[in-house]
Image (spheres, rainbow, N blue to C red):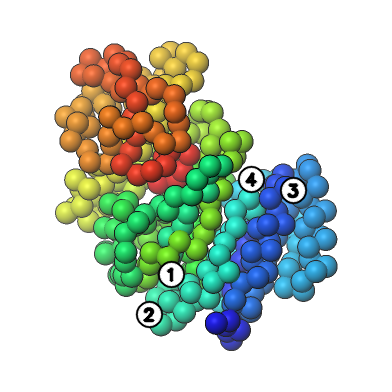
Amino acid sequence: MSSCGNELISIIVPVYNVEQYLKRCIDSIINQTYKNLEIILVDDGATDNSGKLCDELAKLDNRIKVYHKKNGGLSDARNYGVERATGDYIGFVDSDDYIDEEMYEKLYEAIKKEDVDVAECNFRFIYSNRIANYTEDNYYLILNRDEYTKEYVNMNKIFGAAWTKLIRSSLAKEIKFPKGKLFEDGFYSLELMKKARSFVIFDSPYYNYVMRENSITNSKFNEKNLDLIEIADDIYDYVVLTYPYLKKDVARRKMYSYFNTLDAIIVSPDYNNKVYYNNIKAYFHKNFLQLLINNKISINSPNTKNESPIVVENDSLEPICQPISTTSSFNPVAFTI
């Protein structure tokens, strides 16, 4: 059943060099069953035909607004769009992904029914040869900030991405994505978790996250991957200070992030000569027993996304050839926490 809705939803789509994916993305937004949309395309200085394609798409639907700007990165493009959004609610879609036609209708219905600040759905990983839901759990949960933090820390239902959410505009406009960070959604989600009073989360996977080999978060290791450790430390510090009873849970999540950063470092050239490698190695020296009992990490299952052998360290932290994975069915190196 379609829904017109009285309130305007602004959808921010940052665009950079995605000409082969952009039309599919925008078509999926145009075809939403919730019709009262403001579709904001932010051309972040694309060097291919993406910017021109944005203008062409805008001619086909008067709900589309196009802005062209100098390249500033994903966070800058999202912030630029939020500043110009006029809707009552704000959502985000990455320009190489696409969404199911009911996504914003269902998020809007949930946010209104439960009178909360944020509604959040499940999502799918779209691989070249398969599709996998982030979680197969069945749930529909109305959560206050404390309850949401617990779910977020435990990672079973909440991924921490901006693009699974619908957020009250007044709240979304209070928070900035951090410029220059690779795992910007993690930093944003932490601030949202601090500010929002209530959430509804549910299991329907309406968002389709396309796994591209050359995407920013799926590329070879560079020092920006260390942003994952920075946000893991920030989350740990916040949770331990505010919710000390969650210390063990957030410590497992922190280790998960350190381990996945190590995963990425190991496959880079001369990894053992890097200062950051030695810092991470020291962390595992200190926490080796916790690593062994961490239920977020498995040393026996091959990673479903990265088929190459990865390194697990023994108590002397000398490499031993073992495939590693998390308990989830995706490569967490490629994602924000």
In the image, which disc is placed on residue 119?
1
Instruction: Tell me the amino acid under the disc marked 2.
Output: Glu
User: Which residue matches tag 3?
Assistant: 19
- The outermost residue toward the bottom is 6
Q: Position of residue 231 (x, y in %)?
A: 40, 43
| Comes first in the chain, label 3 or label 4 | 3
In the image, which disc is placed on residue 114?
2
- CA gap between label 2 and label 4 equals 35 Å
Instruction: Tell me the amino acid under the disc marked 3.
Output: Glu
Q: Position of residue 257 (x, y in %)?
A: 36, 38
- CA gap between label 1 and label 3 equals 30 Å
Helix, strand or loop at mark 2: loop
In the image, which disc is placed on residue 28?
none
Closest to the camera, between mark 4 and mark 1, is 1
Instruction: Tell me the crowding category of disc 4: few under 14, some 14 to 19, or many 20 or more residues within 10 angstroms, Cα based.
Output: some
| Comes first in the chain, label 2 or label 4 | 4
In depth, the one of 139 and 288 nearer the eye is 139
Closest to the camera, between mark 2 and mark 4, is 2
- CA gap between label 2 and label 1 equals 9 Å
Please identify the quarter of the rendering in which residue 158 is found. Answer: bottom left
Q: Position of residue 151 (x, y in %)?
A: 29, 58
Residue drawn at x 39%, y 76% as measured from the top left: 116
Residue drawn at x 83%, y 67% as measured from the top left: 59
Q: Is residue 288 visible to the viewer in this orientation of the structure?
A: yes
Helix, strand or loop at mark 3: helix
Q: How many marks?
A: 4
Helix, strand or loop at mark 1: strand
Instruction: Tell me the crowding category of disc 2: few under 14, some 14 to 19, or many 20 or more residues within 10 angstroms, Cα based.
Output: some
Do the numbered discs 3 and 2 sit on residues whose CB atoms are within 8 Å? no
